[in-house]
Image (cartoon, helix red, strand yellow):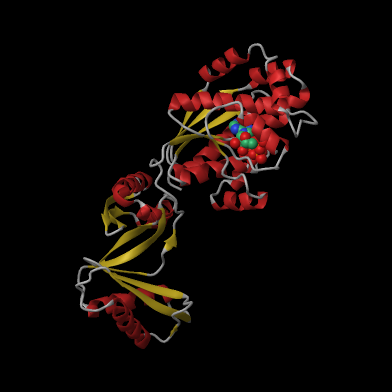
């Protein structure tokens, strides 16, 4: 008997003939995500992934589970006892030992769930559950049986070998990153945009980030905050690039030439144009933002219409129908919230008008925008001056 880790995946199941592409990518991503924690053999086995530690420091066990659970595509992970001896007496003994270890002397209700993937096995799934459940019940006096909502569930899977485990840790779900192309997320340092980036990456998209920096109006600390946020989401997304765009000159030019009330929308249009240029250069096919309808002046229907008209590429706004408290809940779940609420100014708060248009008319915005006679060349210049920061998946944590 030894211990291994069992990783379960979900939606890949719907993928018919191409399934193996998704499975292989998921295995590659897992391998990458647990790099540095030890040596592992990772393989598929009947729709599950087996992670067999060849060497694993005990202190890293928790981190291993954490990393596997945070890999998009994974719906559950468990540390599992494995035995090759399928004799029911052997299974009973391991099951009892495991249950004792896990429940100690706590008074709990329990049930045994058994699955027989090996159809040649002499007992059916319900028979295995009954035999093992009865044996545990007879040998422990702190447990009562509850098949509907038990506090402790012991799982047994009989395959080419037998797995015995109890705590299946829920995974983040989604699709393996790298199976659905690449997108570029506009990351501001606020609460919303990291959540938006996370949501699209969750669907298997490789995500890089772009940040518009208005030095010296925005401090180095504001930039550092965006770097920190990128690191936090890279825990899920994997290695990524953060493009830092020098934005000040464009903003000053815009402020000099255009009507105050139009600045917010024009600024957002320019951000989109630059993001699109970078995305095209880097092989990304969509832009991601953290906008949600009605949250601020630039997120009304007409504002969104007027900003979208600035580019041809699709803009993904996964939070479009979310309330702020729903976004906050997600931000806490993915562990970006604490960083997002640090009080460093972003470039929008410095150059915004007191009373921006909330119902901008596209034609009027364009009349203002064309007053920026140096717009095209300045956009080119900004793209050329971009600083690229390589974000590596966070070190051991
Ligand atoms: P967030 O919480 O993500 O900052 P927000 O509610 O503050 O969003 P805005 O400031 O209007 O809304 O920004 C809307 C979206 O535009 C952001 O979610 C982000 O995707 C993008 N964005 C705003 N400012 C920047 C910036 N300085 N650099 C990159 N992207 C930005
Ligand atoms: Mg913001």
Query: Could you say which is closer to the camera, residue 3 or residue 375?
Result: 375
In this rendering, the answer to whether 4 lies above or below 86 is above
Report the number of discs: 0
Left/right of residue 155 with respect to residue 353 in the rendered view: left
Q: Residue at x 59, y 15 (%)?
A: 376
The quadrant in which residue 5 appears is bottom left
Is residue 177 or residue 316 the one in the foreground? Answer: 316
Q: Is residue 257 left or right of residue 172?
A: right
Q: Position of residue 378 (x, y in %)?
A: 60, 15
Residue that sits furthest to the right in the current view: 355
Is residue 222 visible to the viewer in this orientation of the structure? Answer: no
Q: Quadrant of the N terminus?
A: bottom left
What percent of the width, then of the height, locates residue 205? Answer: 44, 40
Q: Is 113 above or below relative to 240?
A: below
**Residue at the (48%, 77%) spot, across then down:** 149
Taking 384 as reference, is 210 above or below it? below
């Amino acid at each position: 008997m030894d211990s291994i880790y069992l990783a379960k995946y979900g939606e890949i199941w719907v993928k018919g003939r191409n399934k193996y592409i998704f499975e292989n990518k998921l295995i590659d991503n897992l391998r990458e995500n647990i790099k540095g924690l030890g040596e592992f053999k990772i393989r598929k086995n009947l729709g599950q992934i087996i992670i067999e530690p060849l060497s694993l420091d005990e202190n890293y066990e928790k981190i291993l589970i954490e990393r596997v659970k945070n890999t998009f595509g994974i719906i559950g992970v468990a540390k599992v006892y494995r035995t090759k001896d399928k004799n029911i007496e052997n299974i009973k003994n391991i099951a009892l030992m495991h249950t004792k270890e896990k429940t100690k002397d706590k008074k709990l209700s329990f049930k045994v769930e058994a699955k027989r993937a090996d159809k040649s096995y002499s007992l059916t799934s319900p028979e295995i559950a009954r035999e093992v459940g009865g044996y545990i019940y007879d040998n422990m006096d702190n447990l009562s049986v509850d098949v509907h909502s038990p506090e402790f569930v012991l799982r047994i899977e009989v395959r080419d070998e037998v797995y015995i485990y109890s705590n299946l840790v829920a995974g983040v779900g989604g699709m393996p990153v790298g199976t659905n192309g690449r997108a570029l997320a506009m990351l501001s340092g606020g609460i919303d945009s990291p959540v938006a980036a996370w949501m699209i990456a969750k669907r298997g998209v490789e995500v890089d980030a772009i940040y518009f920096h208005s030095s010296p109006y925005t401090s180095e600390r504001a930039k550092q905050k965006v770097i920190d946020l990128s690191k936090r989401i890279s825990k899920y997304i994997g290695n990524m690039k953060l493009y830092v765009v020098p934005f000040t000159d464009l903003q000053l030019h815009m402020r000099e030439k255009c009507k105050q009330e139009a600045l917010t929308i024009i600024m957002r249009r320019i951000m989109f144009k630059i993001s699109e240029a970078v995305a095209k250069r880097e092989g990304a096919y969509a832009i991601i933002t953290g906008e949600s309808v009605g949250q601020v002046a630039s997120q009304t229907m007409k504002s969104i219409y007027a900003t979208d008209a600035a580019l041809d590429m699709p803009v993904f706004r996964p939070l479009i129908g979310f309330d702020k408290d729903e976004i906050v809940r997600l931000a806490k779940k993915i562990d970006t919230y604490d960083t997002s609420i640090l009080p460093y100014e972003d470039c929008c708060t410095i150059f915004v008008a007191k009373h921006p248009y909330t119902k901008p008319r596209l034609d009027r915005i364009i009349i203002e925008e064309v007053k920026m006679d140096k717009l095209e060349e300045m956009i080119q210049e900004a793209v050329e001056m971009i600083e690229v920061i390589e974000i590596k998946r966070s070190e051991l944590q």
